[in-house]
Structures are given as C-alpha cells and as structure tokens.
Amino acid sequence: AQSVTQLDSQVPVFEEAPVELRCNYSSSVSVYLFWYVQYPNQGLQLLLKYLSGSTLVKGINGFEAEFNKSQTSFHLRKPSVHISDTAEYFCAVNFGGGSNYKLTFGKGTLLTVNP
Amino acid sequence: GAVVSQHPSWVICKSGTSVKIECRSLDFQATTMFWYRQFPKQSLMLMATSNEGSKATYEQGVEKDKFLINHASLTLSTLTVTSAHPEDSSFYICSARRGNTGELFFGEGSRLTVL
C-alpha cells in the first residue's frame, strides 16, 4: 500500500539549533517528493521538491532535503532555525511520478522554535 | 511566483444553507485544480480533482452531491457545500496545476464554520 509517514507530530527546538523533520514513504512505483510549510490559517507554500537528478535538494528559507531511495525517506533539514520557522511542515508524495499530479500528504510535523 | 486566491477566507453559515468557495489562479491558466479538506491539527485530505470543462473526479468516500465542484474556466474552480451541517465545518484548500510545469500552487484556504 502507498503511504506517507511523518514520524514526529511535534518537534520543539531552540533558536539557531539544527533540525531534521523525518518523512518516510511506502511505494512500489516511482515517486515525486515534496515538502510544504503551512503557517496558521494559511495555505501551503512549497519548500522544495525532488523529481529526479541529484538526491540532495535545496529549497527556500535555507531548507534542504535528501532523497534516499533504499530507505524510502525524504528528510527535511535546516542547519540553524529561526523563530520564524515555527510552522506546520507537510511531506507529500506523488505516487507514480506522473501525470495525475495527485499528492498524498503525511500527517504533518509541528516545528516550534523557542528563543 | 504564481498566485492562487481563495474566497472567502472565512465563512460562517447556518445549518442547512449552501456555501460557495471560489479558487482562482490569478496569473496562469490552471488545467487542473484540486480541492482538499483539512481538519484541525490534521493533514490535507484530497476531496476531488477538477479539470476545466469536465466533471470532477471525487475521491472515495466524498459525496459528490454534497460537495459540488465546477471548473468553468481555466482560472476558476468553485466548491459548493450544499445543505451544510456542523460536521462540514473545516478548512478547505484548493491547489492549481500550472499547465507547462505541472507544479501545484496552493490557495490560502477557506475556513467554513457551520452553526
């Protein structure tokens, strides 16, 4: 079965600390991978995506993610977080890597950056 | 970047009334739009896929007569929640696919509260 798992529902960190938000998926087909950020009462903003090519993907706001096919993971990282990074982060997968553009979302991880 | 706008952002209605939510792609033509529902502190659940000029494709378990979707033009899709009940209260988010790149852009979301 195809699924997206974000293991951590909440991740509290201190400002300027590094952070990793984990995302694993289950699939027998090729995938496109995405990370989105959602601020309270707002829509989603794309942080980064992996479609093909280099497995290390850099996105906006200093975030990066690495696609690991053998571990079926796409973890999001930032070396030094800011208070403004406090938000909900969603991992999303397009199974089949293709034309339907349908996304399956993980349950989300609430990142809270404390001073 | 591409902009997708939803209106209204907040709506409160009485039980039994119908509510229409609009999703517009402001600076590109969207051949496909998607409607999601998000419960508090939960992930986005795809409700339906809307293609311009054709009937929407609903996900399993979504009542098509309850959630009417119309995609009359390449820049506008509407979701009408008919005979709304308190259990329909939720955050509804649309996304639009930009034709050439296939990238999805999300609206700001619309919060529906049914009294």
Image (cartoon, coloured by chain):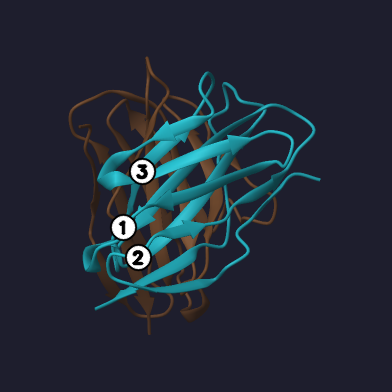
Chain colours: A cyan, B brown
Disc 3 target residue? A47
**Residue labelled with disc 2:** A17
Q: If you read the primary sequence from the N terminus, does the residue marked by circle 3 or circle 2 appear first?
A: 2
Q: CA distance from mark 1 to mark 3?
A: 16 Å
Chain letter for mark 1: A
Q: Are marks 2 and 1 in contact (CB under 8 Å)?
A: yes
Distance from disc 2 to disc 1, alpha carbons, whole Å, reads 5 Å
Q: Secondary structure at mark 2?
A: loop
Chain bearing mark 2: A
Give the left or right position of residue A85, taking residue A1 as reference. Answer: left
Q: Earlier in the sequence, mark 2 or mark 1?
A: 2
- The three-letter code of the residue at mark 1 reads Ser
> What is the x, y in percent for residue B20?
33, 56
What's the amino acid at mark 2? Ala
Q: Secondary structure at mark 1?
A: loop
Residue labelled with disc 1: A80
Task: Assign the C terminus of chain A to one quadrant of the image.
Answer: bottom left
Which residue is rendered at x = 31% and y = 67% of the image? A86
The disc, 1 or 3, on the residue closer to the chain's N-terminal end is: 3
The secondary element bearing badge 3 is classed as strand
